[in-house]
Image: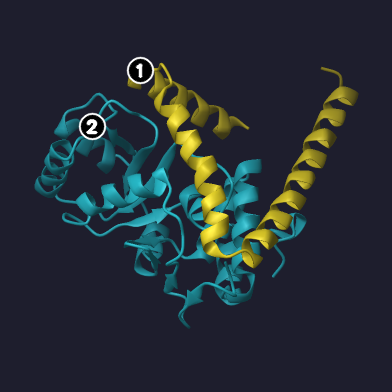
Chain colours: A cyan, B yellow
Amino acid sequence: MMPENMEIDTPGRMINFSEKQITLLDRFVLDFIQVLEQQTPYVIVSGYVAILFGRSRGTEDVDILVPRLEKARFAALHDALLSEGYEFLNAEDTGGLYEMLTGKMGIRVAKKGQFIPNIELKFFKDDIDQSVFQSRVDVVLPDAHVYISPIEVQIAYKVWLGSPKDIEDALFLFEIFRQHLNQELLKKQMTAFHVSGDEYGIIL
Amino acid sequence: MSAGMSMELSFDKKAHLLERLAFVRQYAAWVKRTPDAEWSRQQAALIDSFIENARNMPLSKENYLRIVDRRKRAEQHD
C-alpha cells in the first residue's frame, strides 16, 4: 500500500486510496456519512482508522465525532436517518438522545433490524476532539471519501487506551505510515497523552 | 490466586502481546509491499464474513447494549 501505492500530499491532509476494495463495513460507513454530511461535518476516530488501512480484524462499531449540534439540527439528522432505514439502538426519543449527546455520551445507530455494525456518534467533548476535527485527513476511496483523525493522534490515543487490541492498532498504523508521520506531532501527542510507545516498538 | 501464579499469568500475557506485536509488524510489512487491490481483497473476505456472521446473531438490541456496557465497564477496571 505505502509508500509504493498510496499518494499522500505534503502536509499529510489527504490520502489517495483509489484501488481499495470496499468492504461491507466501508459501505456501511460511507452510506451513513452520506446522510450525516447533509447535517454536519464529522471526523472518524479509533479502530476503524486502523481497519481502513488494512488491519486484519473486524469491529462492531465505528466512532464518529461531530461538533455540538443545535437541538433542531440534531432532530433533522435523527429524522433523516430514520427515513433512510436506520434506527437508534438506545431506547430514547429524540430529546433523550440529544441529552445523552450533550451529557458526553455516545449514541448508537445501525441499519434497522441489525445492530452490528453500528455507529457510535458523539459530540466533541474537549479541545482534543476539536483539534482532531480541525486537522482531519481526507481519505479518497474508489467512489467516495471519508474524513479521519490524523494518524499521529490515533497512534498516541491507542497507546493511551492500552488494551492489547489498541496497542496492536497503534503499532499497525505506526508501521504503515512510518515514513510519512510527522515526528514532531507524534511526539507532541505522546506527551499530551502521557504515554510512550517504546516498549511496543513505536519509537520516535 | 498465589503471588507466584499471578506473576506467571502476567508474564504469559506480556509474552503473548509481544508475539502478537511481532505478527502485526510482519503483517504491516506485507500490506506495504502488496498492491492495494490484493491486500484489500483478502481483508474484505475476512471483514465481510465477520459482518455476515454478526448479522445472524440471535441478540436483541437491548441485550447487545447491555453486553457493550458491561464490556466497557470491565475495560475501565482493567
Q: Quadrant of residue A16?
A: bottom left
Residue A8 in the image: state x and y as whole percent.
48, 76
Residue A174 in the image: state x and y as whole percent.
63, 63
Q: Crowding at label 2, few (<14), some or many (≥20) Cα neighbours within 10 Å?
A: many
Q: In this rendering, is residue B13 above or below A200? A: above
Which chain is indicated by disc 1?
A: B
Which chain is indicated by disc 2?
A: A
For this orientation, the residue located farthest to the bottom is A10
**Which quadrant: the C terminus of chain A?**
bottom right
Point 47% across, 50% down: residue: A48
Point 77% across, 52% down: residue: B22
- Looking at the rendered structure, which numbered label has been put on residue A84? none
Point 36% across, 62% down: residue: A147
Q: Nearer the viewer, residue A170 or B69?
A: A170
- Residue ID for mark 1: B60
Q: Nearer the viewer, residue B65 or A57?
A: A57
Secondary structure category for the residue under label 2:
strand
Q: In this rendering, is residue A71 above or below A5? A: above
